[in-house]
Each structure stands twice: as C-alpha cells, then as structure tokens.
Amino acid sequence: MVEEWRLLDTGVHDAFYNMALDEATAVARSRNLVPNTIRFYRWKPSAVSIGYFQSMEDEVDISACESKGVDYVRRITGGGAVYHDYEGELTYSIIIDEGHRLVPKDILNSYEVLCSGLIHGLNLLGVQAEFKPINDIIVGGRKISGNAQTRRMGVVHQHGTILREVDPALMFSLLKVPSEKIRDKLIQSVKERVTSVDLHLGREVSFEELKNVLNEGFEKTLNIKLARGKITDHEKRLTAKLREKYSSKEWNFKR
Amino acid sequence: MGRASYKVEGGKMIKVQLTQKDGKIEEIKIMGDFFLHPEELIEQIESMLVGSPLEEESLMSSISALIEKRRAVLLGCTPRDFAKCIMMASV
C-alpha cells in the first residue's frame, strides 16, 4: 500500500495568511488532526519574507516595499530574505511528522531527502537540477530554489521557493544594500548566480505545469500518493488567529 | 552601538549589534541567515551573553556549551563564528 498524503493547492493569498496556514497545518499535524501534507501556494501582493534570525530593518527597504505595494513578513524558519513575486515564484511546504521513515535525524540530510521531490520534478521538465548543501537547489551552478526547515512539536515543516521568472533589479529595489555604489554589482552577481525555470528552458512554463511535475516528483521520490484535500475547519480557525501574529509589528520587527 | 557583519566562508552571514560597558556585553542581538534549531534558543543565547566579558574564547565556549546542553543544531556557521562576529562588533 502506498502511503497517502494530503495535497493542498491553496492558490493565491497574502503573506500573512500564507505563513499562518503553514504554521496552522504544522500544529494540526502535531495533534494528528491532519495527514502529512504538501502544499503549493503563491503570494498576492508580492512579498518579501525574511528568516527568523534576520532584522527586518536591516534586510528590507520598507519604504520601497510600501510604495510598490509589496508586503513583508518574518518567517518561522531561518535562512535568508526571499522575494516572492506573484508572477515569478511558486512556494511549497511539506509538513510531516518527525518520526517518519523519510525524515533523517540529521537536519542537513533531511533537506536533501525532502528536496529530492522538487529535483525530480524539475528534471521531468528538463531542468537538470541538483541539491547543493545546506539548503539550495541549483541548475548549471545557478540557484533555482531555496529551502528552509523548522522542527517543532514532533513535526518537520519545510518550505521553499521555486523560481519561475527572476528579476534581480526588482528584487534589489526591495532589499537593503550595503551602499548604493554596489547595487549594480549585486544585481549583476545575482544575474550570474540565480536562474529560473523559464530562463533555463527558454519558454514560459505555467504554474499548473510546474505544480504537476513537482507533484509527480514528490510522489515518485518519496513513494507516496498525493490526494487533493481541503483545509480543515480547525486549520481555518488557527490560521485566522496566527494571521494576526504574522501581520503584527511585534513579530515582524522583533529582531 | 557596535555593529559587524561576518560572512562565513562557504556558509551563512552573521550580523551582530551590541552595546558594551567596562569590557562586558550590555545588550546584544545576533542576526543573520543561518539556521538554529530550535529557533528560540537565539534569544536565550543573547540573554546569557549579557554581562559576559568580550573575550573570544570564553564567548565561544559558553555559546557552544548552551547549544550542546539544549541539544540544539546550528547550521551554516559555528559558535566560533558567532564569537568572532561579536568581537568584530566590539571594536
């Protein structure tokens, strides 16, 4: 019997809802109220997320975000600042109990195991992706996906980004740079170090196509069956509550 | 207020902000794009460091001891890197 997991495709939401639902699902999983879950989502408005340990003021140009209508939020996971473009970026999360056969005790190894589904999915598209420790997926030496994990209450919660399109100039207009003088240099270096699915393949890949191959990638490499499911009422209530945390100044500016 | 950034070779970025008094840490924040499991331990590391003398070896060993005691996992940098960056922010 192939193990069945829940697939959530939650479409497009704002940053605060997106982060709140991830945490709500992790809580629900820890209480055994929902099965292991893989979720796909997008961000509208586009948003910058920062890692748990980062300083919002240090990393994000708040006034640039506000004038462009871009949200900013602190994640529950470590790692770096990510620009989640509405058109250019797909986010996934995996929520799985920590004792599961797929989860190595060693956190570094578990990144590689959980990223293998994404890598296989990208390979199906013709993108020859590979894992690069600690937490990246690269193709031809360029980063195409960044991932971050937290472990709480006996649950592993990993989320990450898959770039469909990339615009380094826009990205750096939203992030703080050490000095204006080096802005162009940073943009140039990101152009050399980062790629996207569309850029790599030289064609437009729709979000549907991308989700389908990633779906297949997860099913094959993790040896699971993904069954399209719904958010439970419990998760909905918890998400509404947690959304207040993620949209609060207290949380977002706590470091 | 002292500030420093330190990019670990092949690893992550650490940023430290601190104030000091008589060679000891008065206030401190350790920031960056590293990973620490559990995440909340960073706040405990910071409060433990308040009152500590600015001396790299002792900072390193007390951070390292707390991480070990809590069976925490630090990824992308080491307690030594934290200590180095703290010393950089203190001058």
Image: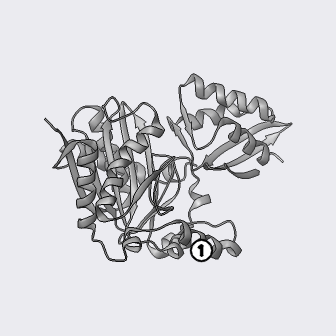
Residue A6 picture location, percent across and down: 20, 45
Residue in the image at 36% along x and 69% along y: A86
A176 relative to A24 in the view: left or right: right
Residue labelled with disc 1: A188
Residue A159 picture location, percent across and down: 38, 50
Q: Is residue A118 above or below residue A139?
A: above
Q: Secondary structure at mark 1?
A: helix
Q: Amino acid at mark 1?
A: Gln
Residue in the image at 39% along x and 61% along y: A128
Q: Residue furthest left?
A: A1
Q: Residue furthest right?
A: B22
A172 relative to A227 in the view: left or right: right
Residue A217 picture location, percent across and down: 27, 52
Q: Is residue A231 above or below residue B53?
A: below
Residue A17 versus residue A216: which sits nearer the camera?
A: A216
B65 relative to A46 in the view: left or right: right
A94 relative to A68 in the view: left or right: left
Classify 10 Å Cα crowding around label 1: few (below 14), some (14-19), many (20 and above).
Answer: few
Residue B85 picture location, percent across and down: 73, 45
Q: Colour scheme in the image? A: one colour
